[in-house]
Amino acid sequence: MACVLVLFAAPARAALDPALVARLGAEDSDTRIEAIRKLVAAEDPRAIEILKALDSDALALHDRRAVIVVQGQMTDAVTGQPAGSAPPRLETVVINNRIRGELGAALAALRLGSSDRAVRLAAAKELQGSDNEDALPILERAMARESDAEVKDILGLAAASLALKSSEPEQRAKAARALAASDDPQVRQLLATMITRQKDGSYPETDENVRTAAQVSLAEINARLRSTEIGAALFSGISLGSILLLAALGLAITYGLMGIINMAHGEFLMLGAYTTYAVQGLFRSHLPGAFDWYVVAALPAAFIVTATVGMALERGVLRWLYGRPLETLLTTWGVSLLLIQASRSIFGAQNVEVENPSWLSGGIALAGGTVLPFNRIAIVMFSLAVLAAVWLLINRTRMGLFVRGVTQNRAMASCTGVPTHRVDMLTFGLGSGVAGLGGVALSQIGNVGPDLGQSYIVDSFMVVVLGGVGQLAGTVIAAFGLGSVAKFLEPWSGAVLAKIMVLVFIILFIQKRPQGLFALKGRSAEA
């Protein structure tokens, strides 16, 4: 009697229809998709095996019956019983991308019954973009038995997204109100589409009450995510500002402190980036186990390479041109062309790829699909560290004292025994080395090519001139300020127009205040 009671108490589950499973091999894609959705609605344990076999090209039709072929042996897809060896010419069912996408959502719906929380969470997230209305009852039953709060919330949003496709206006309105708790960008787009008037004057959503509910939900989502979007824009501005700071910091030393208009400064960025590429190749060939740390090794290598080239340029060319800015500009422009052509001859004209180490890959996910990349965060921190090191060197060391003395009064510094020519060489090498460090950072956010430096030379001069010649504090404020303003302007004006507006602002500002944000003080400013 106990066995009988157990049998009657067990939930009745109808066996899969062989004809339904056989329709998975039909020629029409719509027929296949309909069969997939009905298999999902059946919630039969065999459905997962059948759909997995279809997804892995292991499902075939034999005598009008679906079979699963594994290593030449057939298994009945419905019953799971052995069906003998596969005939030599038995062809498996071939699927296209549309059906493969439907299979992904179907398998996700069936995985909601897994005992593994991670599996259920992944399945719930995958179903958020599904349009299979037959999966709605499965989602509702999964929500009823789900104990994890995060998984249950995602299931609720997925169910509401599917309910928007219901034929009942009340159910669609209820779903639209439920979606107000979502931060998914696709949900925002879906609600916005529902209330957007089409060219013929109609709406995708015909019921006015549903449109009202969608409009209220969209307003709640936008209000909740506004602070996140502002924070993301601020981070983008700081990120761009940190890149401009790394590019302009070396120029602030060579141009601001030494008065040299170095048009080859962008090419020192390029040299630092190519040095990073070369170090990456060495680690990949000789130290593959320590590949994730090639960036750390590239920092001193890039500094040494670019500082050496910079000191050679100063000793060989620029020391004869002090006090002649036009000749310095033309000479360094010619040097930049030579460096670009040399990089093309050595590394090729095409861009090369520098791979991010694992600890710089990925990012921090925020609401609304916003991601703060780890490589951008690292560049911000690195630029501040480089800035602190340069400030300490200029203001707290004997070398920095010599640099400031030569900058303020070269003749007097020479009379007191300061080796001015040696200070000039080391100062130019320092500025070039800092540019090389900037090239290491740039290699982590994009490809490296011969024209890399040309994209930053104009911006670097704008930062230095706006901040004030020879003023590190002004360079910092100008870099972060210009980066933030540009990123806040881009959403409504576009990147090109935003850059033009920033340039116009700098021109007008310099007209009113030629010395920049911070002016030099002392006798050097009066000279």
Image (cartoon, rainbow, N blue to C red):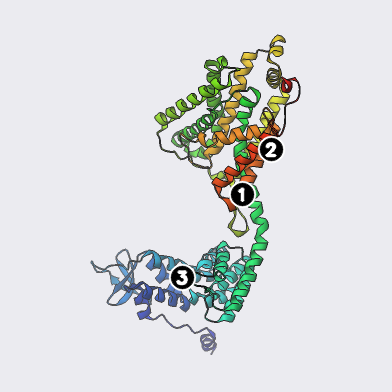
N-terminal label among 3 and 1: 3
Decide: marks 2, 1 in contact (CB < 8 A)? no
Q: Nearer the viewer, residue 88 or 486?
A: 486
Q: Name the amino acid, label 1.
A: Leu
Q: Quadrant of the rendered structure where residue 359 is?
A: top right
Determine which residue is flagged by label 3: 106
In three-dimensional space, the C-alpha distance between marks 2 and 1, rounded to whole angstroms, equals 18 Å
Determine which residue is flagged by label 2: 477
Q: Give coordinates of residue 190: x percent, y percent.
A: 55, 67
Query: Is 151 situated left or right of 334 in this image?
Result: right
> In the displayed image of the protein, which residue is found farthest to the bottom?
1
Q: Name the amino acid, label 3.
A: Ala
Which of discs 3 and 2 lies nearer the camera? The answer is 2
Q: Name the amino acid, label 2.
A: Ile
The kind of secondary structure element at disc 3 is helix
> In the displayed image of the protein, which residue is found farthest to the right?
522
Residue 24 in view (yes/no): yes
48 up-or-down from 270: above or below: below
Determine which residue is flagged by label 1: 489
